[in-house]
Image (cartoon, coloured by chain):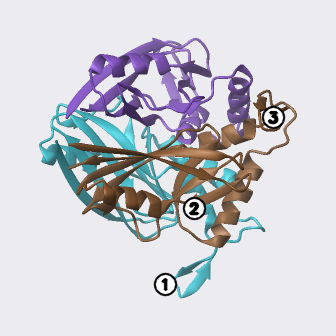
Chain colours: A brown, B cyan, C purple
């Protein structure tokens, strides 16, 4: 068994942003020299997500609109506040945490013949839910 | 470490359908001759899901009704359209993609003594969210 | 490859309760003597969840309030009923199952240097959705 672990950092540009990281993960799988096994993709933040979806411009907008509707930013009963060091102020961002619970923040994907085993329309998206910020996710490739 | 990978295809019958695939996955675990480890079940489609739930007829209806309510088919702002080759027309199915984000499309289940380690009421369901269609999911069994 | 599997039982105290089990999982990782690999945390119940979130009192209340709102207990069309042996009566608890679908009931976390590889604010929570009850979850540590 071989285990290959890499940390990937990225700077997000928007408050809510879907970033296609499929090619990054595929490159790490290739580097690992692991032929068969699987990959764990794991975000280190509680206001981000990781999902597998189709890459289509209209769908990206539908995803943002859906989460804005189902977990609204304005809700009088929110209790969670968060100190933003960069802004020197308290902020109320429980909606970002709640959205992260719904998306999930890690993925497990089979690896076959030195590549991710994905469906024809499947792409891996890192989901920024409270940006812009510097973010890090871990890619592990495990197998033989 | 042994890695045993199988693809399972199925034809779904309804637009929204929950299909109990527990026995199929258990058969693959048994075939694999892996005594202890885990299994990854991974759908290759972005309008399907995989969940673990109790198998009970009333609950199956509640799941369908809940997703129809929380991610409605009719919403004037949907942007995503999809070409259905079989129908020769464009269709608007972002609700199926959004439902898939909420269910998730893969599972990881412990394997012990050549069987899935599931709770007494737990069954594995493949969730068709935009059928009927031919679908494929991957079952990997990894361990010793 | 080493595989170390433990079952953890706990008694929950509330109907909807978030229980920080991070230290329990870390102790099992340490006991396993596995230096690098990953951990699978898997609940054996269909009315519980497992999530990774920040541990903050206000956020805990926001999570409860959000799920009470999005999957309400009172809904005239619920079909699923469940016999509670301890109470000798039928109960309607589909909301607990539906909430479990949204949270998910298992997690996969990287292990590095004999410890969970978590972000600075990430904690692992077992989510009781239909308590109080005795519950069990499985922790597997896999690696070298």
Quadrant of the snapshot with the N terminus of chain A = top left
Q: Residue at label 1?
A: B85
Residue drawn 53% across and 67% down? A54
Residue A5 placement: quadrant: top left
Q: Which label is found at residue B97?
A: 2
Residue A16 at x, y percent in the picture: 71, 53
Name the subunit of mark 2.
Answer: B
Name the subunit of mark 1.
Answer: B
Q: CA distance from mark 3 to mark 1?
A: 46 Å
Q: Nearer the viewer, residue C56 or B54?
A: C56
Q: Residue furthest bottom?
A: B88
Q: CA distance from mark 3 to mark 2?
A: 29 Å
Residue drawn 27% across and 61% down? A114
Q: Determine the secondary structure under disc 3.
A: loop
Q: Residues within 10 Å of mark 2 (few under 14, many from 20)?
A: many
Q: Residue at label 3?
A: A92
Q: Determine the secondary structure under disc 2.
A: helix
Q: Is residue C139 left or right of residue C132?
A: left
Q: Closer to the camera: disc 3 or disc 2? A: 3
Q: CA distance from mark 2 to mark 1?
A: 18 Å
Residue drawn 54% across and 57% down? A125
Residue drawn 47% across and 16% down? C23
């Amino acid at each position: 068994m071989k285990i290959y672990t890499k940390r990937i950092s990225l700077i997000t540009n928007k408050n809510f942003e879907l970033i296609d990281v499929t090619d990054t993960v595929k490159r790490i799988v290739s580097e690992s020299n692991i032929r068969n096994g699987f990959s764990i993709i794991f975000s280190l933040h509680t206001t981000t997500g990781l999902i597998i979806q189709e890459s289509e411009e209209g769908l990206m907008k539908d995803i943002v609109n859906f989460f804005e509707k189902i977990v609204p930013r304005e809700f009088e009963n929110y209790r969670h506040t968060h100190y933003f060091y960069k802004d020197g102020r308290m902020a109320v961002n429980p909606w970002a945490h709640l959205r992260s619970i719904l998306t999930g923040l890690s993925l497990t994907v089979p690896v076959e013949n030195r590549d991710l085993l994905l469906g024809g329309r499947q792409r891996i998206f890192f989901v920024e839910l409270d940006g812009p910020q510097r973010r890090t996710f871990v890619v592990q490739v495990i197998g033989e």
